[in-house]
Amino acid sequence: MDELDRLGLRESTVIVFTSDHGYHLGEHTFWQKSNLHEEVLRVPLIISVPGMKSGRTQSIVELVDLMPTLADICDFNVSPEVQGKSLLPILKDHSVSVKEGALSFHRGGISYRVNGWSYSRYKGGSEEFYDMKEDPEQFSNLVSQDDNKYTSQLKKMRSRFDKRLKSLGLKVGK
């Protein structure tokens, strides 16, 4: 940043910072990156655009959103086949969202993360479902709960998950 300032380029440069995803060090008896839990899937994402106010958002986004975002900022056209969505509306107003949730993929499983919930389905049909407000470390899989407290929410998540996969021409398990 200091070098951009020194060169007089800061006010004409978009900066994007992200990194590789997380790493398990024994949590859930997992080692490294071999699952669909939150610790492994989340990445930092910072976007700085000249002339835009800085801030934080709770919006869920995907890394596929970076290309359409940068194209939008630079006023380039994006092909309709591109799966990501521009995050420019979020950069302008940190309280908005541009998508319902984020998909993540790992060895025969797909996870769908929306505000408050995480749902995963694997080849063969096994599932995981977590209340991310009550159980952010994902220790209590609600699919295997005996009570019906989460049945309605689980049905909604399955439906949202299937709809998102169908929109991308994908399917897993079931």
Image (cartoon, grey):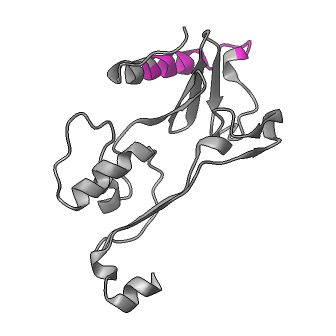
**Looking at the image, which is closer to me, 115 or 174?**
174
Q: Is residue 153 left or right of residue 165?
A: right
Residue 58 lies, in percent from the top left, at 48, 51
In the image, 95: left or right of 136?
left
Task: Pick the residue in front: 145 or 50.
Answer: 50
Q: Residue at x 56, y 33 (%)?
A: 117
**Which quadrant does the C terminus fall into?**
top right
Q: Depth check: 45 or 134 in front?
A: 45
Q: Which residue is painted at 60% across and 10% down in the image?
A: 125
Residue 47 sits in quarter: bottom left
Question: Could you tell whether 109 is left or right of 88 in the image?
Answer: right
Above or below, 147 against 89 in this view is above
The residue depicted at 60 percent of the width and 18 percent of the height is 122
**Where on the picture, by quarter, is residue 121?**
top right
Identify which residue is drawn at 37% across, 18% down.
166
Is residue 107 in view from this perspective? yes
- Where does the image place residue 5, in percent across and percent down from the top left? 38, 87
Magenta segment includes 155 = yes
On the image, the x and y values in percent for residue 133 come to: 63, 40
The image shows residue 116 at horizontal and vertical percentages of: 55, 37
Magenta region, residue range: 144-161
Q: How many marks?
A: 0
The answer to whether residue 5 is left or right of residue 23 is left
In the depicted structure, whether residue 3 falls above or below residue 45: below
Residue 61 visible somewhere in the drawing: no
Looking at the image, residue 46 lies above or below residue 149? below
Q: Main secondary structure of the magenta part?
A: helix
